[in-house]
Amino acid sequence: MVRKTKEEAEQTRKALVDAARTVFHACGVSRSSLDKIARQAGVTRGAVYWHFQDKAELFFAMREDVFIPMIERTDAFLYDAAYRNPLDAIAASISEFFRVLDDCTVVREVFEIMISRCEYVDEFASVQEEVGRPAQEFLEKIERMYQKAAAEGYLRAGISPEAAARDTWAFTSGLLHLLLGCRKDSGLAAEIPGMIATHMALRRA
Amino acid sequence: MVRKTKEEAEQTRKALVDAARTVFHACGVSRSSLDKIARQAGVTRGAVYWHFQDKAELFFAMREDVFIPMIERTDAFLYDAAYRNPLDAIAASISEFFRVLDDCTVVREVFEIMISRCEYVDEFASVQEEVGRPAQEFLEKIERMYQKAAAEGYLRAGISPEAAARDTWAFTSGLLHLLLGCRKDSGLAAEIPGMIATHMALRRA
DNA sequence: TTATATACAAACATGGATGTATGTAAATTA
DNA sequence: TAATTTACATACATCCATGTTTGTATATAA
C-alpha cells in the first residue's frame, strides 16, 4: 500500500504529530531525528517531508494543537458570568489550567517539551515570542478582572489592580515552571489548589 | 608555542568556559559544537578534550562558576542580622538576586542558557535536579524566615508561614522565567523592585 | 477508461560532530 | 642536563542527520 486515501493521509499526519510529541518528550527536540519520529509513527521520513517542511513545522503543529484549546478553556472560566466576584473567576481560571495540566498527558507533555526540552534559538526563537504573547495577554486579562474587582469592592485596600495582576502573573508562571521543571517534585501537584486559594485570599477585601 | 605554563593552562581553561557560555548563549547547547567553542576561545578541540571530558562537563563547569556565588550572595542578605524584620531580609535577598541578574552579563547569560537554551534530557537531566535542589532549599529557607516573622508578629494574620513561603517561592520563580524567558519584555526589569515591594506588602501585618 | 496527481518509500549525496589516536615542543622534574 | 610530563594541535575513523531526488502503486479526476 503506497498511495492512501485523503482520510488515511490525514491520519498519517496526526500520527506524525503524536509521534513527534512522544519523541520530543523522550529525547529532547534537537536529538529527535526525523527518522526516529517517522519510525515511531510507523512510516518513513518520506511521509514527514510530505506533510511538513522540516522539524520546526512539525513542532509548531504539535504546539498549536494544545495551546489554542488551552487558552479557550481557561478564558471560558475567566469570563464566566456565573462568578459574581471577579477574584473567583481568576482563581477558577488558574485552577482549570493546572487541572488540565494534571490529568491530560498530551497537554502536560507539550508544556514539558516547551519548558525543558527545547532550545529557543534560530528557528525556535520565534516560539519564545509565541509563548510570550499569551503570557502577556494573560496579564492584561487578569488586570482588567482585578480592575473590575476593585470597582466592585472585592479587592483588598492598599493594592492596585495593576500590582495585583502582576503578582498573580508571576505566581502562575512560577507555579507552572516549578511543577514541570523538576521531576518527582514531592507531590507539588497536590498542593496547587491550596496554593491558589492562599494566593487569592491574600488579595480579597 | 605548544606547551604552556600551569598558569597559562588555567587561563586556557577559563577561556574555554567563557567561550562555552558565549556560544551556548548564541547557538543553544546542542548546536554548540566543541569546535565552535574551541575556535571562540582561540584554541582547538584538543584543548577542550584535555581540560574536559565532554560538552556536559564544560556545561557543568560554566554553571557552577556562577551558581554557587549567587546563592552565597543572596543568602548573605537573607541572614543579615541588620534586618530586624525577617520580611525585610526576604525582600532584600530577592531584590539582590534580580539586581545581580540585571547588571551582571555573565550571570544573566548563564541563567538564560539554563532556562531557554538547554534541553534537559539524558546527561542534562541531572542538571534539572541540581537546579531543583537550590530552588527547594530556597523554599525551606524562606519558610523558616516566615516562621520567625510570624513568631515576632510581623506576618499578617490569616496566612501560615508555609503558605506564605510557597507563594513567595512561586512568585520568585515566575519572575525569573518571565524576565529571562521572553526577550524584549517591554521593560519588565524596571518593574521588578516595585513588584517585590508589592508582593511583600501583601503579607505584612 | 485513461491520465494525472497523490502519498508516500527508497536511494543518494553531503556535511558536520564526536571520540580517539598520534605528534610535538616546551615546561618540569630528577 | 637528560628524561619525562604536560598542554595542547593535528589527523583519522565513524556515525548520524538532513535535504533532495527518484520510483511507484493507487486514489481521484476528466
Image (tube, coloured by chain):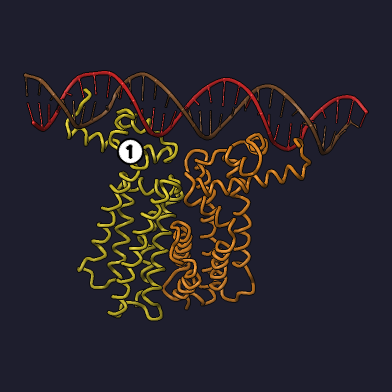
Chain colours: A yellow, B orange, C brown, D red
Vertical comparison of A104 with B105: above or below:
above
Pinpoint residue A127: horizontal percent, then vertical percent. Answer: 38, 51
Q: Which of B51 and B31 is in front in this view?
A: B31
Q: Nearer the viewer, residue B6 or B44?
A: B44
Q: Can residue A184 be seen in this view?
A: no
What is the chain letter for disc 1?
A
Vertical comparison of A161 with A18: above or below:
below
Q: What crowding class fits label 1: few (fewer than 14 Cα within 10 Å), some (14-19), or many (20 or more)?
A: few
Give the labeled residue for mark 1. A53
Amino acid carrying mark 1 in the image: Gln
Q: At 44% across and 49% down in the image, what residue appears?
A: A120
Pinpoint residue A35: horizontal percent, then vertical percent. Answer: 37, 30
Q: At 65% across and 34% down in the image, what residue appears?
A: B46
Pinpoint residue B125: horizontal percent, then vertical percent. Answer: 49, 42
A70 sits to left or right of B165: left
Looking at the rendering, in which quadrant would you find the N terminus of chain B?
Answer: top right
Q: Is residue A26 visible?
A: yes
Pinpoint residue A79: horizontal percent, then vertical percent. Answer: 24, 66
Q: At 75% across and 35% down in the image, what residue appears?
A: B2
